[in-house]
Amino acid sequence: MNFLGGLRTPFSSGLNSVQSIINTRQLSSSLPSLSRHTPDKYWKITRYVKPINETVYEAGQEMPCGVKVPKERSAYPQYEYETLYFKRQNRGLYGGLQRRVTASRSEYLNKTLRVQLPNIRKTKLWSEALQKSIKTKASTKVLKTITREGGLDKYLTKEKPARVKTLGLKGWQLRYDVLKALEDKELPVVRKDDKTIRVKYIHPDGKQFIASKEELLAQLHAHVQNDSYYPIEWAKYQKENVHLSFGDIVEQLEGYNFDFSQVTAK
Amino acid sequence: MSWTVARHRFKRDPEKYTGVLKEYWKKKVQGTSMPTFENFTPYKLPKHERKTDFQVGITQGDLVYVTEGEKKGSIAKVYMYNPEYNHVMISDHTEQRILPKSRWTEGTTSHVIDMPKFMPLTSIKLAGKDKDENGKVSYVVADEVILKDQYYDDRYKRWLPRRFVKHHESVEIPWPAPEEVEDGELSTKESAALEKTWEFQTIGQPPVPEDALPELRNPYSQYKKRTLTALQAYKLNYPDMPLTKEQKIYLAKKQEQASAKKLTPLSDEIKEFIGSKMADHINKIESEAMLAHLEGLSKVPNPDFEKNMAELQQ
């Protein structure tokens, strides 16, 4: 709305005051016509998402009111942009595409509402990090993007806000799996007893563990059982100690003077 | 909605009726029965307005002065106070009713019986009995009573408020003695019940064994404060999304920059320069309101500034 744009003599004396007003008005951000129009491509996703609960609970804090402790810990982190409409997009790689409502026009220009669904294909996509192909539905647009990015892993692990918003729930979960696998792959490979094994965990004191967390917990269970008069069932013990981290288990085993030579590379 | 709740929700509850509907319902229930057969149906007080006899100030055994009705001007004794209707039942205040034979109880010999009549609190006044040195009995009738303080009444074995005549607060009307309960064959004597057979020996040793505590207290009580165990906290929390390679590089770089940035105190020359600039600016301001505003603004604590100063001092 530059209504002074066509003016040939903007610095003419008669119009100086008007020009100054216009210049000062330009500073005001409340003037919609002068502000930049930046449409949010994913407004439909961001507008209708359900806010996630980001509270971090700690051991020893007061039992929160109205919160039910689930039977098992969630396998995946919370997804901020999980859509609550057109829910099939949460079950595949839809790339932020939803159904669109349009009107078909007859010969007499009568409007009849109809929907246009995104072009969805069932595919198998190879994941280099997970070393397996993933059977999923994906929109052709996402397939094109995956090709352009150079593989499923790169598509999933890109951290641009637009990518995070359009991943969908399924994509978010795959992203977690891929990043976890990549994190594990960063650990060194060692040789022990003529076998090449990937290290599972490196303790702060430098011990490289080749045994899994479960195997180590079983060792700890044997020690705890030894100390107890009553039998402690393995399944129950395992269930009640899922929260122990690898480091916690190692520390507890150190208390029992456990010989780590069998379970460590170094 | 469960069936139990649904049943209550759709049931007719005349107690909830108000105004005209209440009157209408009362008439409907009464029907066309003769006055002698009429039921005693005054309006019930809503539950939150009900009070006990000691909260109202009239209890069983009190003397009252009747101000309305047939027995107007007489002194009577209170038999009971009904909190539901806010009425009292007093002595010698009965009405004759006809009782159908189907409702006779053991010992009834006539269709006509004396039924005790309930009186509203508005038609009675509390009376206190007084005897002077010559043995002459006189009554003090209280227009209104007020309840003040508290004392332990050994007769009732409980704490009770003191009762005074309103505007004459030196005149106390004591609570009547409670009715004596006769001991039966199986009753325990008061002395036996109150006898102390056991007491604390030491504070080092708990009076109740620890294993017996959950049996005495309810470990599942909803009023008990509970804390989250490590397992529960673990289950409630969600796993974190691992960082990508790019994110890790970015964070490392940022941390490096943060550690490289160091604050140094300003030199006196710069301080003077800034001070003179500010003084010039403030001296130019003529508006008193603006000056007052700036004065107020300078007193607002600035957390960023304090943080920087703390960092500088370290």
Image: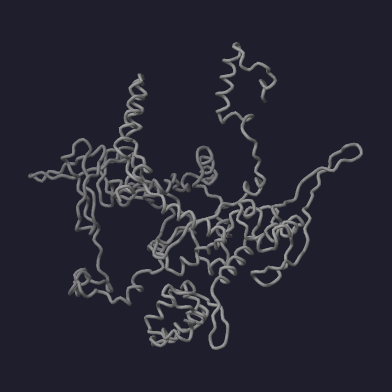
Can residue A138 be seen here? The reply is yes
Give me the residue at 33% from left, 77% from top: B211
Can residue A88 be seen here? The reply is no
| In front of the other: B262 or A111 | B262
In-image side of B230 versus B309 (left or right): right
| In front of the other: B136 or A118 | A118
Q: Residue B138's x, y, as percent?
A: 16, 41
* Furthest residue toward right: A107
In-image side of B44 versus B241 (left or right): left
**Number of marks present in the image shown:** 0
Quarter of the figure with the N terminus of chain B: bottom right
In-image side of B193 versus B4 (left or right): left
| In front of the other: B224 or A146 | A146
Query: Which colour scheme appears in the figure?
Result: one colour
Give me the residue at 40% from left, 78% from top: A252
| In front of the other: A127 or B77 | A127
Q: Residue A25's x, y, as percent?
A: 57, 24
Q: Residue B43's x, y, as percent?
A: 44, 44
Q: Residue B305's x, y, as percent?
A: 36, 42
Above or below residue B222? Residue B205 is below
* Furthest residue toward left: B133
In-image side of B124 versus A81 (left or right): left
